[in-house]
Image: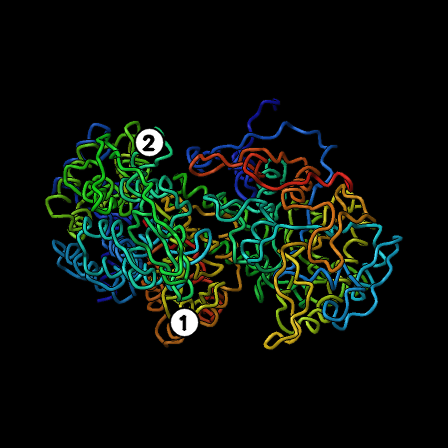
Amino acid sequence: MRRSLILAVALSAAVAGAANAEMGPGIFESSAAVTPEGQIDKLVMARLSPLGIQPALCSDAVFVRRAYLDVIGTLPTAKEAREFIADPDTKNKRRLLIDRLLERDEFADCWAMKWGDILRIKAEFPVNLWPNAAQAYHRYVRASIAANKPYDKFARELLTSSGSNFRVGPVNFYRAIQNRTPEGIASAVALTFMGARADKWPTNQLAGMAAFFAQIGYKPTREWKEEIVFWDPLNSSAQATNNAPADSAFVPTNSAPQVAVFPHGKKIKLPPDRDPREVFADWLITPQNPWFARNAANRLWSWLLGRGIIHEPDDIRDDNPPSNPALLAYLQKELLADHYDLKRLYRLILDSKTYQFSSVPRSNAPQAETNFGSYALRRLDAEVLIDAINNITGSTDLYTSAIPEPFTYIPADQPAIALADGSITSPFLALFGRSARATGMENERNNKMMPAQCLHLLNSSHIQRKLEQSPKLKAIFESGRAQPEIEEELYLTILSRFPTPDEVKALGEYGKPGKSGVRVKSRDDWLDITWALINSTEFLYRH
Amino acid sequence: MTLSMPLSRREVMRVGLFSAAGLLFGGGQVFGAATEPSPARSPALPPGKIKAKSVIQIFLWGGMSHNDTWDPKPDAGYDYNGPMKKPLATNEDGILISEWFPNLAKQADKYSLIRSMTHRNNGHETAAYLMQTAHAPGERLAYPSIGAVFALFRSPEYKGLIPPYVVLTQPQGRFSEEGFLGPRLKPFATGGDPNAYRFEVEGVVARGITDDRQKKRRELLTKLNTMGNTMAASPQVAAAEEARNQAYDLILGEGRQVFDLSKEKQELRDHYGRHTFGQDCLAARRMVEAGVPYIVINYPGGWDTHKDHFQTMGRQCPQLDQGLAMLLQDLHDHGLLESTLVWCSGEFGRSPKVDWQPPWNGGRNHHGNVFSVLVAGGGFKGGQVVGSSDAKAEEVKERPVYPVDLLGSIYHLAAIDSNAKLPHPMGLEARVLPSAAEGVKSAGLLTEIM
């Protein structure tokens, strides 16, 4: 069975290789022709065909790895990869895998991490959210994702909640903002929910929107670091103390603006009996609002495909048009038709052939990239990368916070993607460009490969120790199995695929020559091989 | 060969990767120009005007007492001085320092003491941020530290293999040194212990991997890197490959020699002190020789002595004294003190009045109202005292020195324009130091010692 699989892979590699002799993508691509299935594929192909770009589909081995890393931020195990590759139901297996992954617990962890960047979930610096509040905020976000809360409801809750930062998670949206002036809050709202950078707006546009956020109060309680966020039309919290109201001689006044202007220019007189945040939120989430669904659809697309239809995804403005307007319009329409059911949008995108394109570029033309002619190569996120290495080696990392509070101590086996609070970190996460969660900008997360990161992967005691002391690797090396089986298990564990004949040959040449001429591998040789696979482009990049 | 021959791709990448020059040059595919705009450079200064080529910053995390160190007040009484005895006279007339610094007392001609440093902030993170950025904490931008600013502005000229901004041995962790400049300007933290038999710099020197095995591994990786080889033409893959090659220059090339302290005489190593801080200082001197622009020694051990203050001080001060005094002497002997600026400070001082009550039982608390900073070399005069504190070292008496004055003076000596624009990812207006218009307190550069 195993032999025949290797043969099958080798064969398909040979077939694909023959078809694309000059590119030699072999094992990474499927020989099946690309036939547009849904509307997404039709709209994407309509752009690619005139450019003369004929995309290829990725192989099953590439797909299983891609789907796990993209959908749940977790590496497939050797068993999961093996079973998927061997599954004969070629017609349905990719779709069924996506369905399964969307229901995994790690789905919520992975996407709460992503939203944690956008919503700036971090206990300290540059904003003091505080550990307990960061946990409450994250708990709310993760639970919303796990329950597949409609996106309009999610946004409205974040914008309109009142209560304690420790007990009502979403109120922390207003606390996780460096500049808590009405203008500062309005720019954070615009960035988060409209994908717009308000510093590029005319000043009166921001000022008009800021009026919606001029009546937010923050007041302390008798509990350390607790803060109540509430609608405060009389600006009473400006004088708030820990004393009972009767102790204070403060006379409230209402000096907040009475008129606000929606970002599209319509003025509104703020009703005195209604929290203006609600007035804004209701405008934001109406289906007629051009900003809201477009931003959500574009963001989700960019998170899965590595590039926004409007790029960058949080720089939506008239002079930064979408590369494929019909595609964005279609996704937007589907999101509305499904009543902001995000999981359906995930499924729609993930089931498309476009998502399954090979990552081997078909053309060097810049339009190939902006029109999604191939799957975008991206270095694994810091958290995903260390989790993958830990899964392979069966080790854990220590995550700590400089803030010594109980909420910052976490179980040793917690995966990095499930870390709630950006202040809980490790040197590895910082080195590999985890988001600083200061501004909520997408580009705060940096996945560019830098020499210091190479040093760490190639030669640090941190990684070296994980390899040398790994119980999981030891079990593979000392399983008593034949060499090819060990090689196969290593490849499936690390790269989620079987080795190619060329690789088998290279592996055969590594180690000291034994009596019969066959090279015998010491434990160090196996460690070197593992080390090499972990340092390969294929491992380090989503592809 | 013609003179107009363009830089080879390899050379361009070298400039653009380890150094942060990519930021300044626009960076091609490494960084999109939209996200990393170039700062307005200060008008080019002739190399002769750069007095401080390298900086060694010794950061006394937690906040070191000024009373018990460089601003002793022997007449303040037991409630202020506890068990401290008579201060020591130094080799400069009229300058006294505490009994814990006998070696520094012999070197007073090489350094000056600022005794009127003030920012009135008593929070660790915010005060550490103030001391290393001079920007008010809690503004909407998270500014980069002075080390990251050095790395940014020195990168175009700096060609060394070692990253331009190095921390011995652990980062502070409580504030992001690179600020909004992004991870490329993060300090390179060496890890390891320079006082160990072998200084294992994380990623550069690994335990148990011989050069032979490194080379064998590298060949194996090249063979097994199937996807990398298939997609070698992709700009992203090529950039990652270049990054890897540069890492190997450090692992297998000359870069790592800098960290090999066994190349120094045993006697010299003894003089620095056989403790982590002493050998940190020696490693810092070797990096200065290699041209590294900015080196931070995060003091291995804390100074946040709310409890057991005098015991902790009695243990740490002699090591600080030994290492720092030897560093100044050794830089001087190598002719490097003129071009190397050394400054040593915590984020604040400690309350002059000792807290004898339980649970402190003789501790000192945070004190940002006035404290002391030691500066030396790189264009700073030695043998001087700047400003003074009042009778009990509780408040500034004369000539306050604010963070913007101290950092401004360092930038001035390094010929970095304090008013230069920094590249902000959102293109926001951000300058190296805040201006007077932003309401930042300033009493002027330290011209009296420059």
> Which percent across, then down, holds residue A454?
49, 52
Nearer the observer, B352 or B129: B352
Q: Is B416 above or below relative to B102?
A: above
Q: Depth check: B313 or A488 in front? A: B313
Numbered circle sitting on residue B429: none
Q: Is residue B57 left or right of residue B266?
A: left
User: Residue drawn at (77%, 68%), measured in percent from left and top?
Assistant: B77
Q: Position of residue A24 (x, y in %)?
A: 32, 44
Image quadrant assignment for residue A72: bottom left
The nearer-to-camera label among 1 and 2 is 1
Q: Give the residue number, with chain letter if any, for mark 2.
A: A366
Q: Residues within 10 Å of mark 1 (few under 14, many from 20)?
A: few
Residue found at the very far left of the displayed protein: A337
Which of A342 and B436 lies nearest the eye of the viewer? Answer: B436
User: Where's the N terminus of chain A, which quadrant?
Assistant: bottom left
Q: CA distance from mark 1 to mark 2?
A: 45 Å
Pointers 1 and 2 within a single chain = yes
Amino acid carrying label 2: it is Pro
> Where in the figure is residue B185, as x and y percent of width and height?
53, 45
What's the amino acid at mark 1? Ala
Q: Is residue A24 visible?
A: no
Above/below status of A380 relative to B272: above
The chain letter under disc 2 is: A
Q: Are marks 1 and 2 in contact (CB under 8 Å)?
A: no
Q: Reading the chain from its start, which is encountered first: label 1 or label 2? A: 2
Which SS class for mark 2?
helix
Q: Residue at x 55, y 58 (%)?
A: B123
Residue marked by disc 1: A412
Against A491, residue B342 (above or below) is: above
Query: Can you give x and y, in whole percent of width and height, for residue A403 in the image?
Result: 48, 64
Looking at the image, how many numbered discs can be counted on the residues?
Answer: 2
